[in-house]
Image (tube, rainbow, N blue to C red):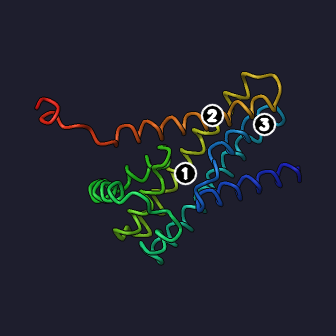
Amino acid sequence: MIEELGTLAGLFGVVAFGAIIPIVPTGAAVSGAAALAFHTQPFTIVLVLIAGAAGAYAGDLVMYAMCRLGGESLARRLRWLRDEERLSSVKHRLEEKQVPVLLVSRLIPGGRVPVLLAAAFVGLSWRTFVVANLPACALWSVVYATIGLAGGSIFPEPWQGVVAAVVLILVVNQSMTWIAKWRARPRPSTSSASG
């Protein structure tokens, strides 16, 4: 039991750190942990969900506080702020629909950081952020743990399920990033193409 608690604490730490420093594949960590739990101790899957959601929530709170206190200059120094156009688009969406944008942001690869930045920069209240981010983190953890469970149930060995879940998450995230970049690229205007 002590070993499982250590693993869950490690998962919490990895996810919280990855929420603050968005280079760690946190979804893959939750998926891998769920796949491993499926093979070793299935009753701990619920604990994996809780640890993943709690880590994501804690990390988001820290990042939001840093953005609120440090503003755009801190976000630029930490390289969180990369795309000014996307940030202004997210700010506009947040002004119209705060809670739905926060809920969906965690499920879109690369969507969480711009939404957190925009929310902090437009002065979204702490209360709104704290309340809306809780179900967003829980839903995120459920989605990634489900992917891990699917990988764990397909393969007979725990390591195969973990590898499959991690690879699947990385492929999906990279594909979504490529699709978003492709959709955002400038298109030639029809008037110049016809002339």
Residue 19 lies in what quarter of the image? bottom right
Nearer-N-terminus badge (1/3): 3
* Location of residue 187 in the rendering, given as x and y in whole percent from the top left corner: 26, 38
Do the residues under discs 1 and 3 have CB atoms within 8 angstroms? no
Residue 95 lies in what quarter of the image? bottom left
Q: Nearer the viewer, residue 193 or 159?
A: 193
Mark pair 2, 3: CA separation? 12 Å
**Three-letter amino acid code at disc 2?**
Thr
Q: Residue at x 69, y 45 (%)?
A: 29
**Three-letter amino acid code at disc 3?**
Leu
Q: Secondary structure at mark 2?
A: helix
**Whether residue 100 is situated above or below residue 35 in the rendered picture:** below
Q: Answer with left or right where residue 153 lies relative to residue 60.
A: right
Please identify the residue farthest to the front as the structure is shown.
Answer: 195
**Three-letter amino acid code at disc 1?**
Cys
* Location of residue 69 in the rendering, given as x and y in whole percent from the top left corner: 47, 78
* Location of residue 192 in the rendering, given as x and y in whole percent from the top left corner: 15, 36
Nearer-N-terminus badge (2/3): 3
Q: Residue at x 47, y 71 (%)?
A: 67
Q: Which mark is residue 137?
A: 1
Q: Which mark is residue 146?
A: 2
Residue highlighted by disc 3: 36
Q: Nearer the viewer, residue 44 or 72?
A: 72
* Location of residue 138 in the rendering, given as x and y in whole percent from the top left corner: 56, 48
Mark pair 1, 3: CA separation? 21 Å
Nearer-N-terminus badge (2/1): 1
Q: Nearer the viewer, residue 179 or 47?
A: 179
Do the residues under discs 2 and 1 have CB atoms within 8 angstroms? no
Q: Answer with left or right where residue 17 lies relative to residue 189.
A: right
